[in-house]
Amino acid sequence: MFKVMSNQMLGHLFALFTIFIWGITFVSSKLLLEYFSPLAIMVLRFSLAYVGLWIIHPKFYKVRSIKEELIYMAAGITGVSGYFFMENSAIIYTTVSNTGLILAAAPLFVAIITHLFTEDERFHINLAYGFIIAMLGVALIIFNGQANLKVNPLGDFMALMAGVIWAFYSLAIKKMDKKMSPIFLTRRTFFYGILSGGIFLFTFEGGIDLSPMLTTNSWMHILFLGLIASGTCYVLWNKAIRYIGAVKTSNYIYLMPVFTMVASALVLHETITAMMLVGCGFILFGVYISENGVKRIILLFAR
């Protein structure tokens, strides 16, 4: 019992830490977009992450079955190249606010996909309640009280597909052999993500111009995105899914705008308004509802 509880606690801590790091990566990505294309940033960060994971865990394993290898491939194409391609493409055709709001719905997509394709994680009404409350908080932070939501069918659809693709990535991670090293599983996933993303990069953009790394501090942001946000955090995220499940792990995605807001204020000197703080409260309340349900709230107030 103690071991199970310990693993559950670790799962929540891993998910929280990962979302904290991913929440502040938007600052680094925004700075890097001055020198590199979105696809180039993706290939650079995951290539560096792959090398880092290989140094930590240089052992190679033989292919045991085509089915297992297809799971690795699916995870790489969905969680790495597919997700980032759809996300960055969405920003081109629609607003950043629209993209952020739609991507924040990823936990709902994960809950639906795992309900359809697994037996141990079922969709329940508390997830829907938590989703509505948390998404209201996300909207308050992203739009900051300004009704500037503009529908762009193509861009919004790409953002929606990015969230759906992430749900299938979570499903692929659940299907992987839990006896295998999480570092190896993540490294194998990155290989297929880099391979598929690299094909698009060299086909449509002709490669990467690394000269900005010699004249600017962009290399520091690449190191952060590669070794910490990709290499370390993907391993921790995958372990969190192993310990507490895909649905509970994905619920932490709701918190990403909160960490992004704080990082933007500290680094980019953006203003935090009262409306955004209210949004943070809604997000935290929504996550609590998703985890514990409405009955727990009623019991607390009934005491």
Image: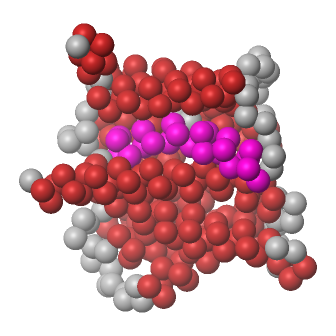
Q: For the magenta stretch, what is the residue range?
A: 246-267
Residue 203: horizontal and vertical position, in percent? 76, 68
Residue 185: horizontal and vertical position, in percent? 38, 71
Say if residue 126 shows up in the picture.
yes
Q: Residue at x 55, y 83 (%)?
A: 51
* Foreground pick, 256 / 270: 270
* Foreground pick, 37 / 217: 217
Image quadrant occupied by the C terminus: top left
Magenta span contains residue 260? yes
Instruction: Note whether 114 is above or below 274 in the view shown.
Output: below
Q: Residue at x 60, y 60 (%)?
A: 81
Picture mark count: 0
23 on left or right of 182: right
Outermost residue, front side: 303
Outermost residue, top side: 302
Q: How is the image coloured?
A: secondary structure
Instruction: Note whether 174 is above or below 283 in the view shown.
Output: below
Outermost residue, left side: 1
301 on left or right of 75: left
Instruction: Note whether 137 is above or below 268 in the view shown.
Output: above
Instruction: Name the chief secondary structure element in magenta.
Output: helix
Magenta span contains residue 206? no
Residue 133: horizontal and vertical position, in percent? 49, 21
- Quarter of the view holding residue 115: top left
Q: Residue at x 33, y 79 (%)?
A: 63
Outermost residue, right side: 215
Residue 139: horizontal and vertical position, in percent? 64, 25
Instruction: Note whether 158 is above or below 241 in the view shown.
Output: above
289 on left or right of 219: left
Q: Residue at x 44, y 85 (%)?
A: 56
* Foreground pick, 244 / 9: 9
